Structure formats: structure tokens, C-alpha cells
Image (cartoon, grey):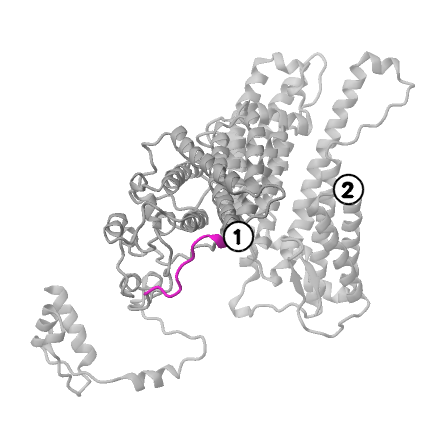
């Protein structure tokens, strides 16, 4: 009652000034509203014209903000009767009645026997299209389970569709199991909710496969019977039957082989991958046949009776709105199912990615595996391939639990070998006297145990989608910072023990350098991911590339050089202790190549690239070619601190404050001392050095070749600007990321 009174009081206050009476019709309003209307005579007036006149006082882009209408209300508001926003409109439009399996069967709208080959092909293709749409992040209720045959597959009398339907449910089960176990999906990647449907749990895997195999063998007989014999002409009818038999056979065989490949991936044993490769190769060949025979399946009837063109018309056995009532009120109601051609293309890419990931077994070391995972992630693979790769490489329940790498190696042993190959700490060498020291051994084992969680997390991050990786890298830096501190302490403690030995030596900055190397890689990846995700504006490029050029890549080159020097020292000590080496002092020895030389050169190239962008951006600023945000709406320090806020958790390298940036890049002072052409010349030199660095790398990969192409183009552009090209033009430059996602090609318009 108190709420009713307050509501009436508000109404009185709002409408007391209006004199024109409103004749209410009690028959058109609810009982509660009748009580309100009957208790008070309201005066109503049409304010449309006054409202329109009042809005003319607002300038373009301005909004009137009511205190009672905040962000939550704005995000939750829907427009009633709008088909795009009001879920009820989707259910109520059109005259077609939504039928489930039993209702459709009773109404003779669903065939469970005597299906034509054309219908069978169409149902299989449409189901695969729904499967692909589900893998792209849509719900099962709106994709796969719109197939009525999957609701009660045991009641389907058609042998092919029954076997295919049961098999499809088993495929859903294994895919869902992979994705849930890997745990590298977000809500936009995958919807695991089953909506009460069962995945043929009563049918064993062997029986489901045997049913499909039996159907496949029968279809193979049809293929052979309808095949033309050498020297004989085949009539068109037999030829058409042969083509249909081949099309149906290819689909059934593909489904069986694909399922078997996924089951073998579950075994997580490297020797099974040879068989997986064979199965996937056959899948790839079958997909070529499937793509060529898509036209043989039944198509939706364009003249079907329905005004709901978002989902209808559809083919036999599919009801897009059958699960509409199972969805929550705010669920996105419209799902566009992939076309059959798009679904085949998607499956072809999926099979190709699954074949590629089998190469992970060749990555014995942790660093090579991490590089493989990062390169695989750059291709933006689907959630299934990301999940399979995660479980294939690192089999574990949680990141905090030590797991098995490639099903055989313990993660602690893999990390120990990674440190040994990176910098060869004396304590990890076979004949080191520190091995027999229980205290030193305890320090090392404790440190390696603490490495498991952050480095397993690093592996897992590569399995997430590219947008989510950035946020997770930010959190990982906190763990790496703590590990960095522990690594420095372990180095110091081991050094205290080693200097007291009979043959004293130093043990400094070994574990610390290794952790620092990975910390820097994460920091660089964090900054560069912003370019890939298009998070930065061009006026921010000055301090972004400055940070990379002056600090991050500088620290990275320094840490790699330190590791190289330490490895050289260890090799020299080993040669001195080797009696054969002492006897052959006069003989010339080949100088061993530095292990990290290739990576050092690449990072030098990237540092020079960033230097070129930084100096070019300063030149554009001096030339008034960069459009700056309005000062009253912008604060560069706030932007700078926001971009690098994640680095505050890291102690080494120390975060660079904004004051240091302004001190080192004093644009007013630069403007007095240099011309834009001077900066363009410096940028030109940087891009030339980057080009030279990349050309010195033997056997460059595709990304390096793309970087070389960008460096050459930018070198030419900077040279043109230095010579006075487009002098006086205020048109801002264009940064084109089509060749490389992080290092753009500069275009001057």
C-alpha cells in the first residue's frame, strides 16, 4: 500500500499542471490500475510537440541523463515488440507450430524410415553445420539439438540416420570432455550447458563405432555395385546413384574416422599420433569429396509457410525453436547457422590444425614447445583444437599440480632441462660438487617446485583466445615477480655455498636470468598484443614504442647476452678440465656458435623496428601530422600509467615512471634542436639496421620474412619523407597492420 501511495503522489506531482482531462476506459486496463485511476482524476496532455522542441536545445551527440536511469538500466533495457530485443516475438511470429520429436512424429511431419539418399545427405550436412556453429560459441539448444533425430535416436528406424545420430551424440560427448578438461575457454568461446539432453550414455563407444562401421560397409557395397566397369557406358540413372552412394559413404566414413582420431588424442600417448595422422589425412581427403557433393542434399523450401525468416524455412528433422523455452530470458535468441559450404571449410581447417599439432611431439625442450604453442595461438585456432593441444602437451588436472609433459616426462624435469639448456647453472651440471650438498639440493628442488605453477599457467594461457590472453598475462606477471625474487635468493644462497668449496666458483644470476628472460617475454607480449587487438590510438605510439625500444628489448638482449657469456665460460671450464683439451692446445678448435645468437639478432631487429616507429612518430608530431586528443578530455600521464599499470608488480626490470619518459622524450626540447626531417632520417637508419639484422638470420620463418618486408617498406617511406616528400601536408599517416599484426607498414597519404 505504501508503494501505491508513493506512486500516486508522484503522479499527482507530475500531472497537476495539466488541465486537459483524460477519459480512462476501465475495460482496457488491469484491476489494480482501475483502482488507481478510480481513486484520482488525472489530467493528461499530449506533450509530443513540446518534447521535440525541447530536444532541439541539445547539441548533436548530447544525451539527457536521468538520475534514475543508470548504466545497469541502460544495459538491461529492451524495446517491447522489437523482434531483435523481445524474445517473445521470435516465438509468436508466423503460423507454424513448434513440434518436438513425438509431436512431429504424431503429426506425420517427421520421417523415421524410408528416407531418400537426398534426405540423408541433407540431414548429415545440416547437423555438421550445427556442430560447427556450436564450436563457434553458440548454445547446443540453438544448434545441434535443433535436430529432432538427436532427441530420441533409438526410435529412428532408418539405419543410417540412427547410427549417425547416436554417433553425433558421442562426438559431442568427446568434444565437450576435451574442452572442459583443458579449461581454456571463456563464455564467448564455448557453451557447455546440455539443457537436460543425454549424450547416448547407454551406448558404449565400441557399439556406436560398430554401428557406423556397419553402415559404412553397406554403403561401400552400393558404391562398388553402381561403379562403371572399364569399357562400359553407364546410364545417367546409375551414374546418379553412384554419385549419391559415394557422397553418403564419404560422410559416414569421415564421421567415423574423425571420432576415432579424437579418441586416440584422449590416450595422450605419443606413439598413437602416427595413427592419428593417418586418420586425419583420410579425413582431409574425404572432406574434398563432401565439399563437391553438397548440392546432392535436400535444401530448405523457400516457399515454406512462415513469416519467421530468421530461422525458417528449414529441412526435414530440424526445428530451430524446439528448445526456445529452455533458454533463459536474457539469452541471445537468434543464432545464424553456418552454411554447409562454410561448415566444410571450417572442418577442413580443424583437421589441418589437428594434423599440425601432432608436431608438438618433436618439441622436446620446454622453450621449443612454448614457441610452438605461441605460434599456433597466433593463427587464432578454434576452442577444440586449442583444448586438444593443451591436453596433448601437458596432462594435468590443475595448474598447481605437477603434470606429465607429452604423457611421459615430469614437468619439473622438463623445467630443469630448460634452465640447463638456457644458462647451465653449475648446480645442475652432472659433476657439480653442489649436487652432493643436501642444502643446495633442497634449495634447487624447492625452487623448481615453485616454478611449476607459473610456467604451467604460461602454457595454459597460450590455449586461450587472443583477447583473453592479454588480461591473463597481466596476472601472470605478479607470479613471475615473486618467482624472480626467489630465484635471486636461491642464486645468492648457492653462491655462498660454492665460494666455500675446495675449488671455489661463483653461482650468481643463473636462475634469476632465466626467470627474467621469461618475464621480459611476457611483458613484451603484453604490449604487442595491444597492437594486435587494436587497443591503441596512433597518438599513443610515441611512448609505446619508446618503452619497447629503450627498455624491454634492451633488457631482453642484455639477458640473452648474459646467458651466452655464462654458457661460453662453462664450456671453457669444461675444456680446461678435459685432458684431451690440454694435450691438443696447439690444435685449432672450431669456435662453438653461441646458443642464443639467433634470438639475440632477432631481438636486435625488433628493437630497431621499435626505434624506427618511435622516431617516426616523433617526426610526425613535429610535423603536426598526428591528431592529438583535446586537452580538456585527455591526460597523457593517466594514459601512460594505465597502459603500463601491469608492470608495477615487477621489480626487475623496474617499471619506468612517466616522469622518466617526459625527461628522455622532451618534445619541446626536441622541437628546438631537430627538424622533422632529422627524425625521419634517424627512423630510416633504424629500419635499415632492422633489415640488416633479419637478413643475417639463417633460414628465416614466415614471420621474419614479413618483418623484413615491413622494414624495407618503412625504410623507403622514411627516406622519402626525409627528402621532403609530402612536405607541408597535415594528413596523418596510416598504419597498416595487414602484413604483420604488431609491426605496421607506414603509409603517408
Closer-to-camera residue (207/439): 207
Give the SS element for disc 2.
loop
Residue 467 in view, yes or no: no
Q: Nearer the viewer, residue 298 or 412?
A: 298
Q: Tell me which segment is drawn in magenta.
A: 295-305
Question: Residue 581: x, y in percent?
Answer: 84, 16
- Quadrant of the snapshot with the N terminus: bottom left
User: Residue 5 shows which numbered tag?
Assistant: none
Of badges 2 and 1, nearer the viewer stands 1
Question: In the rendering, at what x and y percent does residue 555 appear?
Answer: 67, 42
Quadrant of the rendering where the C terminus is positioned = bottom right
Out of 527 and 550, give the one closest to the viewer: 527
Specify whether residue 740 is in view: yes
Quadrant in which residue 208 is drawn? top left
Q: Is residue 92 magenta?
A: no
Q: Is residue 144 above or below residue 623?
A: above
Quickly name the residue at label 2: 697
- Look at the magenta stretch and give its main secondary structure: loop
Task: Give the residue displayed 53% in from the left and 52% down from the top.
Answer: 236
**Residue lying farthest to the front in this orientation:** 232
Q: Residue at x 37, y 65 (%)?
A: 309
Question: First in sequence: mark 2 or mark 1?
Answer: 1
Give the x, y percent position of residue 206.
41, 28
Q: Is residue 357 above or below residue 349?
A: above
Q: Residue at x 12, y 64 (%)?
A: 2
Name the residue tied to disc 1: 236
**Lateral position of residue 468 relative to residue 500, left or right:** left
Kindly report the distance in space between the C-alpha atoms of the residues bearing marks 2 and 1.
60 Å
Q: Give the class, few, some or many, for how many residues have Cα within 10 Å of label 2's Cα (few <14, many ≥20).
A: some
Amino acid at each position: 500500500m505504501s508503494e501505491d501511495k508513493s506512486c500516486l503522489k508522484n503522479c499527482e506531482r507530475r500531472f497537476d499542471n495539466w488541465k486537459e482531462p483524460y477519459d480512462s476506459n476501465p475495460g482496457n486496463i488491469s484491476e489494480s490500475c482501475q483502482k488507481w485511476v478510480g481513486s484520482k482524476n488525472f489530467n493528461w496532455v499530449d506533450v509530443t510537440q513540446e518534447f521535440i522542441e525541447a530536444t532541439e536545445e541539445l547539441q548533436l551527440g548530447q544525451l539527457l541523463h536521468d538520475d534514475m536511469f543508470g548504466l545497469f538500466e541502460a544495459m538491461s533495457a529492451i524495446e517491447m515488440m522489437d523482434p531483435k530485443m523481445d524474445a517473445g516475438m521470435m516465438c509468436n511470429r508466423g503460423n507454424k507450430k513448434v513440434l518436438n520429436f513425438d509431436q512431429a512424429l504424431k503429426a506425420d511431419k517427421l520421417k523415421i524410415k524410408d528416407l531418400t539418399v537426398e534426405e540423408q545427405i541433407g540431414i548429415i550436412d545440416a547437423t555438421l553445420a550445427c556442430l560447427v556453429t556450436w564450436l563457434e560459441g553458440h548454445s547446443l539448444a540453438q544448434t545441434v539439438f535443433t535436430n529432432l533425430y538427436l532427441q530420441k535416436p533409438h526410435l529412428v528406424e532408418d539405419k543410417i540416420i540412427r547410427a549417425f545420430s547416436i554417433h553425433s551424440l558421442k562426438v559431442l560427448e568427446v568434444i565437450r570432455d576435451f574442452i572442459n578438461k583443458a579449461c581454456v575457454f571463456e563464455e564467448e568461446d564455448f557453451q557447455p550447458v546440455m539443457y537436460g539432453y543425454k549424450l547416448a550414455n547407454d551406448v558404449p563407444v565400441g557399439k556406436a563405432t560398430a554401428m557406423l562401421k556397419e553402415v559404412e560397409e553397406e554403403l561401400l557395397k552400393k558404391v562398388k555395385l553402381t561403379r562403371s566397369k572399364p569399357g562400359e557406358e553407364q546410364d545417367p540413372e546409375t551414374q546418379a546413384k553412384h554419385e549419391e552412394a559415394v557422397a553418403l559413404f564419404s560422410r559416414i566414413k569421415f564421421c567415423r574416422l574423425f571420432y576415432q582420431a579424437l579418441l586416440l588424442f584422449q590416450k595422450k600417448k605419443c606413439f598413437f599420433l602416427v595413427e592419428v595422422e593417418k586418420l586425419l589425412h583420410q579425413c582431409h581427403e574425404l572432406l574434398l569429396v563432401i565439399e563437391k557433393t553438397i548440392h546432392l542434399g535436400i535444401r530448405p523450401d523457400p516457399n515454406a509457410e512462415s513469416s519467421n525468416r530468421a530461422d525458417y524455412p528449414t529441412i526435414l528433422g530440424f526445428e530451430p525453436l524446439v528448445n526456445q523455452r529452455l533458454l533463459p530470458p536474457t539469452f541471445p535468441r537468434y543464432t545464424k547457422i553456418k552454411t554447409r559450404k562454410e561448415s566444410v571449410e571450417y572442418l577442413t581447417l580443424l583437421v589441418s590444425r589437428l594434423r599440425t599439432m601432432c608436431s608438438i611431439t618433436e618439441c622436446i625442450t620446454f622453450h621449443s614447445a612454448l614457441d610452438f604453442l605461441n605460434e599456433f595461438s597466433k593463427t587464432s585456432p578454434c576452442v577444440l583444437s586449442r583444448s586438444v593441444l593443451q591436453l596433448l602437451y601437458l596432462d594435468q588436472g590443475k595448474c598447481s599440480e605437477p603434470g606429465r609433459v607429452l604423457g611421459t616426462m615430469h614437468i619439473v624435469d622438463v623445467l630443469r632441462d630448460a634452465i640447463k639448456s638456457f644458462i647451465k647453472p653449475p648446480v645442475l651440471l652432472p659433476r657439480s660438487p653442489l649436487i652432493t650438498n643436501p642444502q643446495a639440493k633442497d634449495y634447487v628442488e624447492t625452487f623448481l617446485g615453485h616454478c611449476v605453477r607459473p610456467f604451467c599457467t604460461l602454457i595454459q594461457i597460450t590455449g586461450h583466445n587472443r583477447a583473453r590472453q592479454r588480461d591473463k598475462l597481466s596476472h601472470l606477471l605478479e607470479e613471475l615477480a615473486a618467482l624472480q625474487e626467489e630465484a635471486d635468493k636461491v642464486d645468492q644462497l648457492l653462491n655462498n655455498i660454492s665460494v666455500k668449496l675446495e675449488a671455489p666458483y661463483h653461482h650468481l644470476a643463473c636462475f634469476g636470468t632465466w626467470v627474467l628472460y621469461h618475464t621480459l617475454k611476457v611483458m613484451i607480449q603484453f604490449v604487442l598484443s595491444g597492437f594486435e587487438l587494436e587497443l591503441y590510438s596512433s597518438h599513443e605510439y610515441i611512448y609505446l614504442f619508446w618503452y619497447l625500444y629503450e627498455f624491454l628489448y634492451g633488457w631482453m638482449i642484455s639477458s640473452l647476452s648474459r646467458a651466452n657469456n655464462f654458457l661460453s665460460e662453462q664450456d671453457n671450464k669444461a675444456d680446461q678440465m678435459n685432458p684431451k683439451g690440454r694435450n691438443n692446445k696447439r690444435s685449432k678448435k672450431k669456435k662453438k656458435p653461441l646458443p642464443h645468437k639467433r634470438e639475440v639478432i632477432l631481438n636486435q631487429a625488433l628493437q630497431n623496428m621499435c626505434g624506427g616507429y618511435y622516431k617516426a612518430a616523433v617526426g610526425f608530431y613535429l610535423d603536426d601530422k598526428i591528431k592529438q586528443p583535446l586537452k580538456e578530455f585527455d591526460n597523457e600521464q593517466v594514459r601512460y600509467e594505465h597502459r603500463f599499470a601491469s608492470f608495477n608488480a615487477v621489480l626487475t626490470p623496474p617499471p619506468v615512471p612517466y616522469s622518466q619518459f617526459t625527461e628522455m622524450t622532451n618534445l619541446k626540447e626536441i622541437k628546438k634542436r631537430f627538424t622533422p626531417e632529422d627524425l625521419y632520417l634517424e627512423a630510416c637508419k633504424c629500419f635499415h639496421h632492422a633489415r640488416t639484422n633479419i637478413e643475417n638470420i639463417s633460414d628465416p620463418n614466415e614471420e621474419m620474412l614479413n618483418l623484413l618486408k615491413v622494414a624495407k617498406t618503412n625504410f623507403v617511406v622514411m627516406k622519402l619523407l626525409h627528402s621532403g616528400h609530402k612536405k607541408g601536408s597535415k594528413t596523418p599517416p596510416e598504419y597498416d597492420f595487414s602484413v604483420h599484426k604488431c609491426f605496421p607498414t607506414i603509409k603517408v597519404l
